[in-house]
Amino acid sequence: KNEVEQSPQNLTAQEGEFITINCSYSVGISALHWLQQHPGGGIVSLFMLSSGKKKHGRLIATINIQEKHSSLHITASHPRDSAVYICAVTRGGNEKLTFGTGTRLTIIP
Amino acid sequence: DTGVSQDPRHKITKRGQNVTFRCDPISEHNRLYWYRQTLGQGPEFLTYFQNEAQLEKSRLLSDRFSAERPKGSFSTLEIQRTEQGDSAMYLCASSLARRYEQFFGPGTRLTVL
């Protein structure tokens, strides 16, 4: 079993819909990261959080440490949000990232 | 541009050849990470440097792989005697210090024929 699991693996939605991507992890962590990867490979860090909730524009990330679960929400989704969203965790020490397999999001105009 | 850069962006090589990739981190970042991503999978950790010291290597990093970070600045990742299974995207990331976010380069896509 992977240490970081994401669901769904693929998600297709209409423009304007509210999007939720889930991440569960099975180990103690120092932080959880949400990352965005566009075609061509570039990865951008969206959020790093260790408790509570963070918001940036239309993106919201929450984490429940007791349940070892995090969600990434996108409000008023837009075709430019189409990308792979990856959940990753760090566990202290060297802070290397352990990644989930990603959620491929497609927003249809 | 003060982001993380990687060179080359694409590399096609024949099986058995040696290849070397370069990563230039953000200048004040002392932590540098190499990851590998195969098609349809999330990235996997390969190795980590704090300044010039290589502090951890994954078991994924066979004896054919070597990484250096002389003077704690840029880093190189060399693969000797490449195999088709080495085909992947090689990603470099850097961070300022512990508990800071990692900034990723654009990656080097390696294809071994």
Image (cartoon, coloured by chain):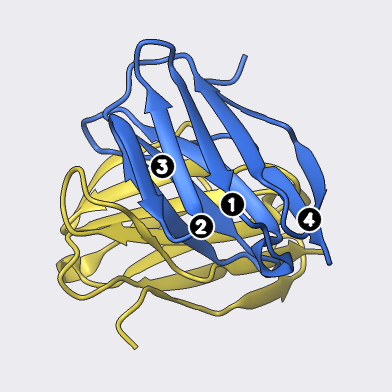
Labels 2 and 4 within one chain? yes
Reply above or below: A87 against B34.
above
Spatial CA distance of label 1 from label 3 is: 19 Å
Q: Nearer the viewer, residue A81 or B66?
A: A81
- First along the sequence among labels 1 and 3: 3
Q: Residue furthest bottom?
A: B1
Q: Is residue B55 left or right of residue A40?
A: left
Identify the mark at residue A75; answer none if there is no mark.
1
Write down the residue under mark 2.
A58
Q: Tell me if I can see residue B82 in this picture.
A: no
Write down the residue under mark 4.
A106
Spatial CA distance of label 2 from label 4 is: 16 Å
Residue at image location 29% in from the left, 72% down from the top: B74
CB within 8 Å, label 2 to label 1: yes
Write down the residue under mark 3.
A33
Q: Chain of mark 4?
A: A
Colour chain A is painted in: blue
Residue B70, image x, y percentages:
21, 67
**Which label sits in the foreground, 4 or 1?**
1
Q: Amino acid at mark 4?
A: Thr
Q: Chain of mark 1?
A: A
Reply above or below: A25 against B92.
above
**Which label sits in the foreground, 1 or 3?**
1
**Which label sits in the foreground, 3 or 2?**
2
Secondary structure of the residue carrying tag 2 is loop
Residue A58, image x, y percentages:
51, 57
Q: Nearer the viewer, residue B37 or A32?
A: A32
Q: Quadrant of residue A19?
A: top right
